[in-house]
Image (tube, helix red, strand yellow):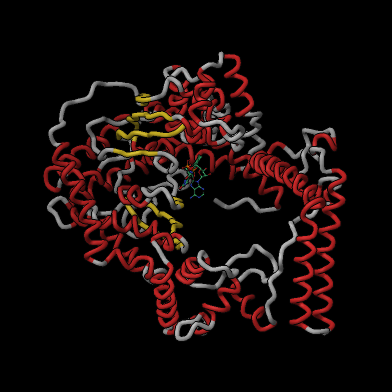
């Protein structure tokens, strides 16, 4: 296999991962192939005979169907033969066959001899009439294979179909034809008849009726996990985006602060939200004036900061204008984002299930801020156009109403208790390791062995406690393996232990780290009492006074908002340079993922430093050197223009694909 050029690193990583997975799969097939020849052949043959009989009954001797019968039969026969051929070479691994452990082929078709392997175990191909096939083709991506996707169906119908699926001996396509397509009154044939305009409402109502019928018979809460919606929430303040992104089981993408200068206006205003509480108050004018001054300072410093970085890191001949400009812009934006207030608006894309949206809306409806509650109404209205059945409980006073009140009342009760805790905390560094397990490495070793033995968990822990350092090293080396890129991750034994960190860093960094979901994090209310950070470059260009002035104005506004409207609303005034306290509690596997990802060369220098420190604490304070060493892609280097490598790789990919360099 040819070596790929270096600039295809990302792709190479994916491909390496794929090849490794593939190898595992092929070895599995080899074993299955062997036993298929000695034990399973009659079963496969019976399946083929049944299949041929079905087809024969269905189609008679018409030439076209005969031809497809022949193809299908040939294919199965071919698979069976390939299974037997496989047995001849099945006892050898890929390395034994080729003597090659390096250049594993990426696709099975590239592996010598593998064209003789069966690609699938033989399976029963379900018979459908020509009419049925015509119907199915509109809603399923194929009608012949055991794997297929559902298309052109309302989300709630997909949920209902799956709900019924779990309790039926029928295949999904058969179930669809027998119980859904022609169901009297609400069948899919009716639902799919209309497509646009006024008929859309009728379609949805019928889908809803169908869902209700199935749900009351077969459903439980989890059916609402089976339909999803992409939803865009635009012009949401940074306070709101954190509420939107709180749930774990959903996918989010948020507008970045690195790819555009935020002094570009949206209409006639800078990009900030005026919270309804403020708009209605005596502080409305002062709020707008302070916001304008923050965005104004951002604009004033942009040119000077760009010139500063241009001098510090001149363009090299190999880099295009686009690559250089994009890199510089990211660097400048990274520094300037500290001036942006939490009121700054952002766009968030969410992909989530009905159940995730239900939980999100219930939380939002209990929230003290009007913007959050207002967006929950907007979201519910839009989601009701797509998945109303999944969200029915949200608005019912006796269900969602009580639920949201429960959330609000516990929050209020805790607020009262917290009011007594006003003492100041002692100064300390921005990352503190609060909790870890002295036996962490022993526990991981025991857990690593678990699935390869038949011993109880506690017996393995006892075994691990008796290991000496060298033996423990051996287990770690074997379990962590030879990771050639950060995507090669050790398994769930690394989840056997965890760390709890208390972090005090600027809101911008928090905003990035908060996006990780496979952990527990909670944050405190944003305020000004922990002070703010000033980027070194701002000091270097003589921008310190402007920075301090902007921070001071924001703090003054924050104080007045707190007095007038309370500390929740006052958060909107606080710039991202101010520090916020939050904790992250994560297992060692997520720590490996997060710390390697977030110390990468292209990341923001702020969160890179936090994550480098977390790694250091795991090694030096917890003393978990083996765990820290497993995280071999944590990058402790400093980079001047961190995005440069990423932009260069992107440019090389564009060039290789023949894509013209974008204008901006
Ligand atoms: C340099 C850099 C730039 C970035 N720029 C942006 C940006 O502009 N905008 C933006 O919104 N984000 C940005 N991100 C954040 C990034 O998109 C991720 O949201 C964030 O890093 C969380 O990582 P994660 O998905 O690995 O989550 P984690 O919670 O750490 O998840 C760990 C792993 O669990 C799995 N997982 C988690 N969630 C899901 C899911 N929903 N479905 C399937 N598997 C899942 C994945 O394997 C994931 O890697 C950036 C990150 C970096 C490092």
Q: Is 176 situated left or right of 610 in this image? A: right
- Report the residue at 75% width, 71% height from top: 50
Asked if residue 406 lies left or right of residue 664, the reply is left
User: Which of 556/530 is in front?
Assistant: 530
Compared with 485, 273 (above or below) is below
- Residue 513's spot in the image, x, y percent? 41, 38
Question: Is residue 561 at least partly visible in the picture?
Answer: yes
Q: Is residue 449 left or right of residue 388?
A: right
Horizontal and vertical percent for residue 656?
Answer: 71, 48
| Quadrant hosting residue 78 | bottom right
In the displayed structure, 116 sits above or below 159; it is: above
Residue at the spot 84% in from the left edge and 72% down from the top edge = 70
Using the rendered view, name the quadrant where residue 202 is placed.
Answer: bottom left
Residue 492 x %, y %: 53, 36
The quarter of the image holding the N terminus is top right
Foreground: 29 or 381? 29
Compare residues 486 and 158 and report the one nearer the observer: 158
């Amino acid at each position: 296999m040819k070596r790929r050029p270096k600039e295809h690193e990302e792709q190479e990583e994916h491909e390496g991962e794929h090849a490794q997975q593939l190898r595992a799969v092929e070895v599995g097939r080899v074993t299955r192939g062997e036993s298929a020849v000695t034990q399973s052949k009659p079963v496969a043959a019976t399946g083929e005979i049944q299949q041929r009989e079905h087809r024969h009954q269905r189609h008679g001797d018409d030439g076209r169907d005969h031809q497809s019968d022949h193809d299908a039969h040939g294919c199965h026969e071919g698979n069976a033969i390939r299974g037997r051929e496989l047995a001849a070479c099945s006892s050898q691994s890929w390395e034994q066959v080729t003597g090659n452990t390096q250049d594993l082929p990426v696709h099975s078709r590239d592996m010598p001899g593998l064209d003789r392997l069966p690609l699938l175990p033989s399976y029963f191909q379900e018979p459908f009439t020509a009419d049925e096939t015509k119907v199915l083709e509109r809603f399923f991506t194929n009608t012949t294979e055991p794997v297929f996707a559902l298309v052109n169906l309302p989300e709630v119908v997909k949920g209902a179909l799956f709900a019924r699926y779990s309790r039926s001996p029928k295949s999904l396509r058969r179930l669809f034809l027998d119980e859904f397509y022609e169901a009297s009154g609400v069948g899919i044939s009716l639902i799919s008849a209309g497509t646009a305009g006024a008929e859309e409402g009728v379609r949805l109502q019928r889908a809803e009726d169908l869902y209700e019928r199935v749900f009351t018979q077969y459903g439980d809460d989890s059916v609402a996990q089976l339909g999803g919606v992409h939803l865009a929430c635009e012009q949401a303040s940074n306070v709101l985006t954190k509420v939107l992104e709180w749930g774990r089981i959903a996918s989010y993408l948020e507008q970045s602060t690195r790819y555009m200068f935020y002094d570009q206006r949206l209409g006639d205003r800078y990009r900030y939200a005026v919270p309804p509480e403020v708009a209605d108050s005596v502080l409305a004018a002062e709020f707008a004036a302070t916001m304008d001054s923050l965005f104004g300072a951002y604009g004033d410093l942009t040119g000077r900061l760009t010139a500063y970085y241009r001098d510090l890191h001149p363009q090299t001949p190999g880099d295009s204008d686009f690559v250089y400009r994009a890199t510089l812009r990211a660097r400048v934006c990274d520094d300037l984002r500290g001036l942006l207030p939490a009121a700054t608006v952002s766009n968030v894309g969410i992909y989530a299930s009905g159940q995730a949206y239900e939980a999100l809306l219930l939380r939002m409806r209990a929230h003290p801020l009007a913007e959050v509650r207002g967006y929950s109404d907007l979201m519910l209205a839009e989601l009701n156009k797509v998945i109303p059945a999944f969200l029915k409980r949200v608005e019912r006073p006796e269900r969602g109403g009580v639920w949201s009140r429960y959330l609000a009342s516990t929050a209020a009760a805790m607020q009262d208790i917290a009011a007594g805790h006003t003492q100041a905390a002692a100064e300390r560094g921005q990352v503190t390791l609060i909790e870890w397990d002295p036996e962490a490495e022993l526990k991981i070793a025991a857990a690593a062995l678990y699935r390869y033995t038949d011993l109880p968990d506690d017996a393995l822990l006892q075994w691990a406690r008796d290991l000496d350092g060298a033996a423990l090293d051996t287990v770690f080396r074997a379990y962590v393996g030879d990771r050639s890129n950060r995507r090669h991750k050790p398994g769930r034994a690394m989840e056997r232990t965890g760390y709890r960190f208390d972090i005090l860093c600027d809101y911008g960094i928090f905003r990035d780290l908060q996006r990780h979901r496979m952990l527990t994090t909670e944050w405190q209310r944003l305020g000004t009492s922990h002070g703010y950070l000033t980027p070194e470059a701002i000091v270097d260009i003589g921008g310190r006074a402007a920075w301090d002035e902007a921070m001071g104005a924001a703090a003054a506004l924050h104080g007045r908002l707190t007095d007038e409207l309370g500390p929740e609303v006052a958060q909107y005034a606080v710039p991202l340079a101010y520090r916020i306290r939050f904790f992250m509690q994560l297992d060692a596997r997520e720590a490996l993922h997060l710390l390697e990802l977030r110390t990468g060369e292209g990341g923001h220098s702020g969160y890179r430093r936090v994550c480098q420190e977390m790694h250091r604490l795991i090694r030096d304070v917890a003393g978990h050197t083996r765990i820290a060493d497993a995280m071999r892609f944590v990058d402790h280097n400093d980079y001047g223009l961190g995005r440069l490598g990423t932009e260069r790789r992107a440019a090389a990919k564009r060039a290789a694909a023949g894509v013209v360099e974008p204008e901006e």
